[in-house]
Image (cartoon, grey):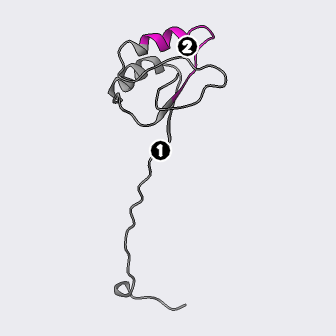
């Protein structure tokens, strides 16, 4: 097998720019506290939708969304069937 001298190998790193169309966040136990720290950091002019999946009993996600909406720059609300994901955040 022939060997190639290291000086003969040209390596040009490539940079890839990726713009997300959506941000997805999944949390479970302890997730409420993590969301309360992370979501207020999102800018009001965030150009993508945010999906949050929180492992919680039924009936608790709506109040959580309203609580988070109270101190976030982005709109946070509980998602409904057939919602369209836009630059407004949903939980």
Of badges 1 and 2, nearer the viewer stands 1
As helix, strand or loop, the secondary structure at mark 2 comes to helix
Residue 37 horizontal side relative to residue 85, left or right: left
Residue found at the far right of this picture: 81
The numbered disc on residue 20 is: 1
Q: Is residue 65 magenta?
A: yes
Q: Range of the magenta residues?
A: 51-67
Residue found at the far bottom of this picture: 2
The numbered disc on residue 49 is: none
Residue 63 horizontal side relative to residue 59, left or right: left
Q: Residue at x 44, y 88 (%)?
A: 4
Q: How far from the left and from the top, in percent, is residue 6?
A: 37, 84
- Residue corresponding to mark 2: 61
Q: How far from the left and from the top, in percent, is residue 89?
A: 47, 26
10 is higher (above) or lower (below) than 83: below
Quadrant for the N terminus in the image: bottom right
Quadrant in the rendering for residue 60: top right
Q: How far from the left and from the top, in percent, is residue 67?
A: 43, 10
63 is higher (above) or lower (below) than 53: above
As helix, strand or loop, the secondary structure at mark 1 comes to loop
14 is higher (above) or lower (below) than 83: below
């Amino acid at each position: 097998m022939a060997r190639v001298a290291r000086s003969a190998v040209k390596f040009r790193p490539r940079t890839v720019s990726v713009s997300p169309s959506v941000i997805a966040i999944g949390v479970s136990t302890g997730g409420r506290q993590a969301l309360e720290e992370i979501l207020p950091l999102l800018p009001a002019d965030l150009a993508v939708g945010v999906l949050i999946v929180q492992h919680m009993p039924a009936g608790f996600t709506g109040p959580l969304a309203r609580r988070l909406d109270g101190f976030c720059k982005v709109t946070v609300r509980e998602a409904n069937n057939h919602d369209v994901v836009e630059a407004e955040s949903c939980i």
